[in-house]
Amino acid sequence: MTNRRVFILQSVIGTSVLASGVVMAAAPMVDPKDAAAAGLGYVEDTAKADAKKYPKHTKEQMCTNCSLFQGKATDAAGGCPLFAGKQVAGKGWCSAYAKKA
């Protein structure tokens, strides 16, 4: 009987972990009009960054090659600690950009 209880408990825990992973993967995207995003000059497409306001910006700089990006370099979107609970566009950019080492 103990083995059955352990199996059922592990099944419930495993299902909960999988469900939470799905919820995390479905995090909303950052709205560029959000106060925090606007303050950092966040854009969903690096080519649309304000060149006058951010003269050091280059089109090679994007979220996927930023050290803050919490996804793979090939991901279309990923997490960023600057925007907790939200995802940024892989091709996006903000003024906090820091090139990955």
Image (cartoon, rainbow, N blue to C red):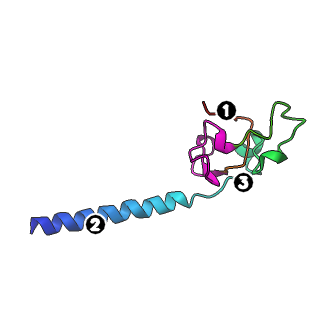
Q: Which mark is residue 31?
A: 3
Q: What's drawn in magenta, residue-wise? A: 63-88
Confirm or deny contact between disc 2 and disc 3 (CB under 8 A): no
- The CA span between labels 2 and 1 is 42 Å
- Residue annotated with mark 1: 98
Q: Distance between the residues labelled 3 and 1?
A: 21 Å
Which tag, 2 or 1, sits closer to the chain's start? Answer: 2
* Occupied quadrant, residue 59: top right
User: Which mark is nearer the camera, 2 or 3?
Assistant: 2
Labelled pair 2, 1 in contact (Cβ < 8 Å): no
Lower sequence index among marks 2 and 3: 2
**Residue 69 falls in image quadrant:** top right
Label ID, residue 22: none
Vertical placement of residue 13 versus 47, above or below: below
Residue 9 within the magenta-colored segment of the rendering: no
Query: Is disc 3 in contact with disc 1, using a CB cutoff of under 8 Å?
Result: no
Numbered mark located on residue 11 in the image: 2
Magenta-drawn stretch contains 72: yes
Graded by Cα atoms within 10 Å as few (under 14), some (14 to 19) or many (20 or more), the crowding at tag 1 reads some
Vertical position of residue 43 compared to residue 16: above or below: above
